[in-house]
Amino acid sequence: MKYDEDADVLTVFVKEEGKLAYAEEVGDMVVHVDEKGKPLFLEILRASEIVPLIVRVLAKGEVAVH
């Protein structure tokens, strides 16, 4: 993971290798995908607002993570 404080973006790396084919914005996230359709990394926009919200929801058990 890497956080850019100036841009308020948290980058979460999913794979270490692969060639970027395209990126798709989904709400406050940008998913960067390889040529096989597999995610390479995610960018969480407005991370200082979004990440604490995700943590609170997970802590309450409102969403299951598999």
Image: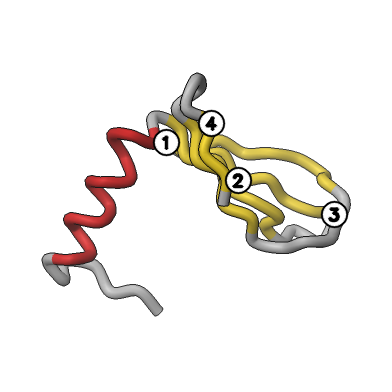
Q: How is the image coloured?
A: secondary structure
Q: Position of residue 33 (x, y in %)?
A: 72, 50
Q: Position of residue 34 (x, y in %)?
A: 79, 53
Residue at figure coordinates x 35%, y 74% from the top left: 65
Mark 4 and mark 1: span between their CA atoms?
19 Å
On residue 4, the disc is 4
Give the amino acid type for the residue marked by disc 3 in the picture: Glu
Q: Which residue is mark 1?
A: 27
Q: Which residue is mark 3?
A: 35
Who comes first in sequence, dot 4 or dot 1? Answer: 4
Q: Nearer the viewer, mark 4 or mark 3?
A: 4
Who comes first in sequence, dot 1 or dot 3? Answer: 1
Give the amino acid type for the residue marked by disc 2 in the picture: Val
Q: Which residue is mark 2?
A: 31
Label 4 packing within 10 angstroms: few (<14), some (14-19), many (20+): few
Label 2 packing within 10 angstroms: few (<14), some (14-19), many (20+): some
Mark 2 and mark 1: span between their CA atoms?
10 Å
| Residue 65 left/right relative to 3 | left
Mark 4 and mark 3: span between their CA atoms?
26 Å
- Towards the viewer: 28 or 1: 1
